[in-house]
Amino acid sequence: MSLLDEVSETALITIRSRVVESEKKNPLLRDPAGADLFGKLLEILSGDVRQRILERKLSPVLTSHIALRARKYDRLCLEFLEAYPDGIIVNLGCGFDTRFWRLGAGSGQYVELDLPAVIGLKRELLGKKMPYRTMAGSVLEPGWIGEVKEIRRDRVLFIAEGLFMYLPREQVIHTLQEIAGSFTGSRLVMEVVAEKYTRGFRRRMVERKMRKGAGSTAGDYYRFGIRRAEDLETFHDGYRLRGEWSYFEDPDIKPAFLKLFRYSRALSKTQYTVIADIS
């Protein structure tokens, strides 16, 4: 198999965190399909990757936050499909996500996009268990937008979980503009980081945290951030801010004292989710 680059390795951190959380006595998220895929990954990954990422102890705060994020995105997807039963979900930078099985969606309602190495490995491991459509390529390349438009041009939910913050700012903005200019009656759910964490000492702080907590240097790739959720509307007039969500708003966040962070924008809006309608 091709070696995954450091950004793609964040997909390994994410699936492992979900599995660790789902195996707890009272899990925040149940992900049996994730556990099955994780077991297959363990069998084929190199010793270096296994030791550096998959076999080290993960912070319980990290695993719970990733589980809470996955649970929230699952709920947003279900709400969208309830409102638009004929709609589709496009999972951008899907990694080793197993959301399709958690949602119980129809195969025609779900699409995944990621780099060829990730999609290829996922298909190799799951084979016929993946009945839905996948697209192998970069989210920054325009080809995938045309492929989605061939399916439908409205009632599309785009989800970008732990993706855009790792990519160059100008290219991210261009991609967001292309999405808004190509679809109507649709929605975007996008995880973002505060712009100040993409530079200077705050960026270095994130890098150290990533290395210590997850064995990854993916923090080196924090390139795109926003100052406020409303910034999205300035990228294209098709976006209309629908809402925001932070881990600290979830009643199940642990340790419990972290709930207090919701009252501070500086703390709660460090890494969070923006939800916008596309008109």
Image (tube, rainbow, N blue to C red):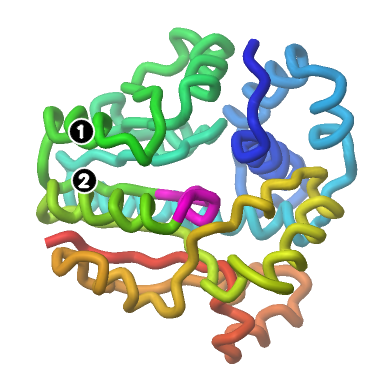
Callout 1: 10 Å neighbours few (<14), some, many (20+)? some
Q: Is residue 164 left or right of residue 89?
A: right
Q: Label 1: state its secondary structure.
A: helix
Residue at the extreme bottom of the image, as rendered: 263
Which of labels 1 and 2 is toward the front?
Answer: 1
Q: Is residue 244 left or right of residue 70?
A: left
Q: Residue at x 63, y 82 (%)?
A: 267
Q: Nearer the viewer, residue 102 or 195?
A: 195
**Is the Cβ of the residue at disc 1 closer than 8 Å to that at disc 2?**
yes
Q: Is residue 183 left or right of residue 262?
A: left
Q: Is residue 267 above or below residue 123?
A: below
- Per the image, the residue denoted by label 1 is 148
The circle on residue 18 is none
- Position of residue 6 measured from the top left corner of the image (x, y, whole percent): 67, 37
Q: Is residue 35 above or below residue 188?
A: above
Q: Residue at x 59, y 85 (%)?
A: 266
Q: Is residue 104 left or right of residue 265?
A: left
Amino acid found under the numbered disc labelled 2: Val
- Per the image, the residue denoted by label 2 is 156
- Position of residue 264 measured from the top left corner of the image (x, y, whole percent): 60, 90
- Position of residue 226 measured from the top left corner of the image (x, y, whole percent): 45, 71
Distance from disc 1 to disc 2, alpha carbons, whole Å, reads 9 Å
Magenta span covers which residues?
Answer: 160-168
Q: Magenta span has 165?
A: yes
Q: Which quarter shows the C terminus?
A: bottom left
Callout 2: 10 Å neighbours few (<14), some, many (20+)? many
Q: Magenta span has 249?
A: no
User: To which quarter of the image does residue 187 belong?
Assistant: bottom left
Q: Residue at x 63, y 23 (%)?
A: 37
Q: Residue at x 63, y 15 (%)?
A: 2
Q: Is residue 179 above or below residue 265?
A: above
If you read the primary sequence from the N terminus, does the residue marked by circle 1 or circle 2 appear first?
1
